Amino acid sequence: MTSYLLYALAGAALCGIGLFGLLRLSHLLRKLLAFNIMGSGVFLIMVGLPQHQSGPDPVPQALVLTGIVVAIAATALAVVLIRRYYHQSGMTSLEGEAGSREGGPL
Amino acid sequence: MTLEEWMPVFALMISLVASVGIFALPETGYVRRTSVNLGAAVLKLVVVIVMVWGVFHGVNYGVSFTMLPGVTFVLRADALSMMFAGLSAVLWLLTTIYAVGYLEDSPNRRRFFGFFSLCVASTMGIALAGNLFTFFLFYEILTLSTYPLVVHRGTEKALRAGRTYLIYTLTGGAVLLLAIAWLHSLVGDLSFRDGGHLVDADPDIHRSLILIFILLVAGLGVKAALFPLHGWLPQAMVAPAPVSALLHAVAVVKAGAFGIVRVVYDVYGVEASSDLGLLAPLSWLAAFTILYASTRAIWQVDLKRRLAFSTISQVSYIILGIALAGPLAAVGGLVHLLHQGIMKITLFFCAGNYAETLGIHRIDEMDGAGQRMPGTSLAFTIGAFGMIGAPPLAGFITKWVMGSGALAVNMDWVILVLVGSSLLNAVYFLPIIHRLWFRKGKETWPEERTWGRLETSPWLLWPPLLTAMMVVVSGVFASSQFSPLAWAELIVLREISE
Amino acid sequence: MTLWLMAGLLFTPLAWAVLTLLTDFVWGRRVTWVGILVQVLVSLGLWLTVAQHGGFYYDLGGWGAPLGIELRVDGLAVTFVLLTAAVASACGLHAGVYIDQHKPWHRYFWPLFWFLWSGLNAVWLGGDLFNLYVGLELISLSAVGLVALGGNANALRASIRYLLAALLGSLAYLLGVALIYGQFGTLSIAGVVAWLDNHSAPAGPGLALALMITGLALKTALFPLHRWLPPAHGIAKSPVSALLSALVVKASFYIAARLWLAFGESLGSLAAAQMVGLLGGAAVVWGSWLACKQAQLKQVVAYSSVAQIGYLFLLFPLTYSVSESVSLQAQQGITLQVISHALAKAAMFLAAGNLILSVGSSRIDALAGVSRFLPFSLFSFGLAGVSLMSLPPSGGFAAKWLLLQASLGSGQWWWALVLLAGGLLSAAYLFRIYRASFAENPETDQFFHPSKSLEIIPMVLAVMALGLGFVSEQVLSVMALPFAEEGAP
Amino acid sequence: MTFPEPILALVAVCLPLLYPAMALRSDWRRVMRYILPVLPLPALLLASCGDPSWQLELPWLLNGGLWALDDLRRLFLLLTAVLWTVAGVYAVGYLAESHIRRFCVCWGLTLAGNLGLTVAVDIGSFYSFFALMTFAGYGLIVHEGTDEAHYAGRVYMAMAVLGEMSILAGLLLAASAADSQLLTDLPAALAQAQQRDLIIALLIAGFGVKAGLPLLHFWLPLAHPVAPTPASAVLSGAMIKAGLLGWLVTLPFGEIGLSGWGALMVAAGAVGALGAAILGVLQHRPKAVLAYSSISQMGLMVLMVGAALADPERAPVLFSVIGLYALHHGLAKGSLFLSAGVSLPASRMGQTMIWILIALPGLSLAGLPFTSGALAKLAMKAGLAEDSLSFALAGCLPPLMTAGAIATLLLVLRYLWTLSAKLETGQTPPMLTAGWLAAVAASLIAFWWMPWDLAGLVKAPVWLPAPYQIWALVWPMLIALALAGLAVLLCRNSRSAALGAKPH
């Protein structure tokens, strides 16, 4: 029982790190990596938390597989966009944009 | 659907379809547009006349369907609505004729006439609305469809006026909506009914009813230009003359007054409203507005502004008559709905003629205009005397009936108000008439246009003459059948009989 | 019959997405026309079926939950499917003419468009939390792609910001899903509700609900998490912005609403409900205020989306621990608001696109005199505006009326004030635009006239938004009880 | 007579009412002026040979109309018709080309109002015609267009509007008190109304503006001199009397004795009769003098009104006296005003002729025996004889009347004096002369065939006063003559003194 909880806690920790990175880091690739770390944290919780007396639950595994696929797709898209953005503007971060009151990733 | 159900829909749709058609036509299709306009106006007049006849003989026109859970969309023709509908139908025809002449070779005519018809359609809807919800529906459409007319000129001044207009009317609309929704959540969907609904409302909602009434009056009072809420009206004067004519005589201002009549008579009911102690303050407010606006009018040098203030004061007669809570006074108020309409539209037509033909906008430019434009000036004189309440014109009938009604319910102070307002009216109208006829005119006018032998284009000349004739006729033949007075008496009779 | 309909509904978009991947822009357009036709017919058919026989659950390929995909086809879902069909096809047709076919990367518009559509359908019909997640991701990614189609640095910046926000949101949601599953051992909403009905509510899942709703709120751009939206919607091409504002944000809200209505009573709290409502109200005021400040036409429209989204979140306080009828009114009101805002905002973005196209500048004060030269588009813009200002007889007004009733009926009168203030503020920023367009200044007399089809499409949408007010009773009756959990075949 | 009076009445009112429509065709202006004298003819016919007991129901009119004629109204109608006819004839010769259409329109409307209010019995149409007369009369006053005229017009308008308003308020209150729309029901109702005094005050003030009641009279001396001569003739001949008629038909005569109001009116009348005389003799313009004379004459009539108010029993008698006096004064004053426009012929003979004709109506005003004036004065004496009157001020009425007679003659002499300074020899337009002569004839001769009746007030045949009456008539005139002579002497001396003082 505690081991599962351990998984979950580790996942939670990863999530926290990822979240921190996503919000704080300015370099886009780092943001992306932070996102991936966060994602794996979530997956960890997903497989870790739901355990029953009847041993490991198969459903989360399937779900996590799907989740990983989605995450990969998202990462790929993000990388494409970032590269193109770098080519266009020569910048690797969203900061320093002019004439807009928006700041930060949100 | 039977014919009884179709008639109100017709009355509503005619001008709606007309406006769509006008929008569909190209800007250059002058003849087609005009024919659509006039054709629709005439057709509508016929329909309305038929309905008036039917209502007089007790036919119930009406149609309704559920629009939202617990809310129905009701079109219904009773005597009161036919009074308003008839007014707008008649004046729409005249104003259309006038506008065709007025806007000759000016840009954006398609837009103008399209929204114009839309505005009339919503007025018709207001007249035929069978419950507060439907009323509000058309009330807001009216607000929207008049905005393009107010800013039609596109000048900075016009745009500013339009802004003020919107700030006032939309806020008023919001307040009104709140009140209606609140009332709806309190007592459900209230269709207008002679005698009202709230006579026997249970006492513990009385406080909220009073509050709602205040909100309703505030919301409607914006359009009716009751005292603190009248600021938009004088500014809206920048609109072209036909617009201000219709705005003042029929559409916007009357919509507000009409709404208040509906609320007092057909929603709350006279007994209920007076039991709640709502009518006396309303009458005081109306009386104050009458005197205040007339006093303000004296110092206006711009003709249309002066007329605007006169409108503010005149419309409050209607409210005053209703608020006096006596049948005779109510007749006076209701009949003024028509009388003020024809008198004021006459005055605005004339003001438009002076502006269009001679370029006159200020009162001190009007010296001797009577020699140059006798027909217009004649109409103006009649309208002005009507406003003063000089017998035997329409205004006198109003004052007389309302005065007698006030005395009948022992409110003698109203006589003071009537006399005072007549005095003030005389103070600001007689000098104009003096200038028109008895001052020596200058040789040159600000910007004169000539139409050969005629003083101005016949499109512009006939509408004011006709309305002026109505002013005389509806005054002199007041006691005949189908006179405005008789119709108002019919309305009150039906209201009371409930 | 139903089988075919469902199949058509779910797989034509995917198929067309793949198909259009292989073609260039022009061919993609031609193919898309066929696909749009199919989609519209299918959606209509499904809607009629449900309207006649009521909703049902549908196991995709016979596989049941949890591993299979279980679809929940009720009145509300099919209504939104139909709405999607209407708006998306309008945007597709408009885009086919509007988007410049000579830029090579524009050919990706079509596949992204179709992926978006399939994702939307998946979300409307999805019955369990994880499939909803997948649909959501599908939507987000294709939406980001669409925004990025602009190609220049600003578009990319906006799209990247959008992407990061969306990813963060969906991760939060996924975390919530994980917790829910850990707690209840099921992913189907119905299952969870059933569990909650015969057990007493545990403490933990409150956090899960909070996480999910926060994530979804971030995706829906609820104040103060709205900052990614205006640049994205403002910079994208008009048809894209229309799709985004009209449908994409609604998808995530739809899920949030369903979660709240399913679990809110048992897992939520009054404070939370009022809190969300408060944020919604703040969004209404703040968004409108910023909209008044914008100088760019599309920025105004985008910020108005932020404000309008604020209304939607009034659902939370208005359905928490209130009488059945009030809650029903609130739900109906919100549904109408979603629909009318979708139609109106799509119309508005498309019309704005036409205006910008014709005056050649996206600034508001460049619109002077456009009322004379492009009255038709301006008129559709105005009609859409009527619905956004929630003035009668538009659907927006019907929604506002119901919400007013709900807020007064539940004694939470302050939401009524928010509604009224919101209406006035929206009037403020919209009439700024009309004012500019009514102004007459002779020096700008060069106007490009877009093709008729470009002008007609927004008009159709606007008229639909306007007419919704008159038929709202019928619409509501079809989606019998909105968000009804029960409705088993 | 066998012709239908109601139709005739309708024609009589509508002809001048519709006549202004001619002005719409600009090329009819030539014709318009020649129609002026025709306008009052139907009314003249109606008043002179129509049998007065007819009624005309107009249920559709305003609040339900009713027109009728009784002896009093008939007298006023006659006066109005005659005066407007002769003035119309006069105007044909008098008018200049400028603004002729405007003048004709105002003339027609004023006439219509003046005729209408005499036959109207329902409140609505009475008040309508009264207002019509008031407002249209403005056009006659300011016709000349001089600044003076405009000033007079402004004063007139201001006071007229105030008057209209108080009439409106009074009539409203009265009508609701009587709960009727007919004038004939007002007096009885007024007697009981709880706001009686307020109503009476309003009505007296309102009509008083027209009737030139002291302190409400300011417009008269301003308006008469500046108005065209025919206009001022009808103004002070007929329109002033409208105010009087207004009193007579609304106030509660014969219902109750209102000694307070009676005393007030008597006092007002006295002030008017004497004060106006004092102011009048100081005037330099003939028509201004005449205006003041009108005020003072009205003052005498106000005396009688006050007496009638105070003493219900006496009211019927006084009514007929008032009617008679109004008729006499209207005609005489009309011809006097018209005489202000004639110019003397070259021949000495002719001049004396003219002067006699100018002077006679004046003297008749002053009560010269064998004139209508004598009759009126005697009738007034008899009517106000103190033994038959029972109220406070009855005692001081006879001396007042005597003083009034003196004042009258003084004013007339003053008028002749100023006129003699102004008249110059020249060619008078024929129509003008005709109008004036007609007026003189009406006042001196036709008067005796007019349908006034005085139930045994004066011995018949009236135009042959008994000796004691002659003396009663003459001695005030002698005093007046003496005073006038004195005045002439005085100013002669002062002038010669001034000449003497002048260094050579």
Image: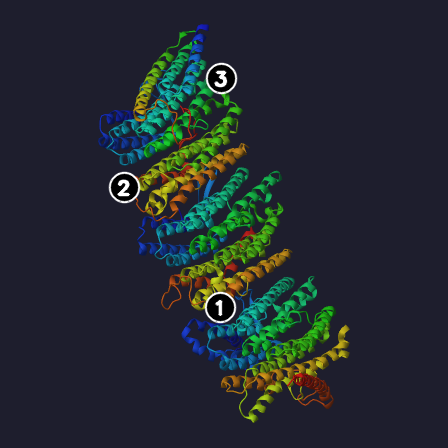
In the structure shown, which secondary structural element does the residue marked by tag 3 occupy?
helix
Q: Which mark is residue B437?
A: 1
Q: Which mark is residue B452?
A: none
**Residue beneath label 2, please?**
C451
Q: Marks 2 and 3: same chain?
A: yes
Chain to which mark 1 belongs: B
Q: Nearer the viewer, residue D94 or C314?
A: D94
Chain to which mark 2 belongs: C
Which of marks 3 and 2 precedes in the sequence? 3
**Residue beneath label 3, please?**
C198
- Residue B122 place in picture, x, y as percent: 43, 48
Res. D385 image quadrant: bottom right
Q: Nearer the viewer, residue B182 or D210?
A: D210
Residue found 60% across the figure and 59% down from its top: B420
Q: Amino acid at mark 2?
A: Ser
Distance in Å between CA atoms under marks 2 and 3: 61 Å
Regarding residue B277, the answer to whether it shows in the image is yes
Please tell me how many numbered marks the rendered image carries.
Answer: 3
Chain to which mark 3 belongs: C
- Residue C445 place in picture, x, y as percent: 32, 47
- Residue C89 place in picture, x, y as percent: 31, 33
- Residue C108 place in picture, x, y as percent: 27, 27
Res. D65 image quadrant: bottom right
Q: Marks 1 and 3: same chain?
A: no
Residue found 67% across the figure and 66% down from its top: D200
Distance in Å between CA atoms under marks 2 and 1: 58 Å
Q: Amino acid at mark 1?
A: Trp
Looking at the image, do the residues carrying marks 2 and 3 touch, with CB atoms under 8 Å apart?
no
**Above or below — where is A62 with respect to B24?**
above
* Residue neighbourhood size for the residue with mark 2, other residues' Cα within 10 Å, grouped as few (<14), some (14–19), many (≥20): few
Residue found 46% across the figure and 74% down from its top: D101
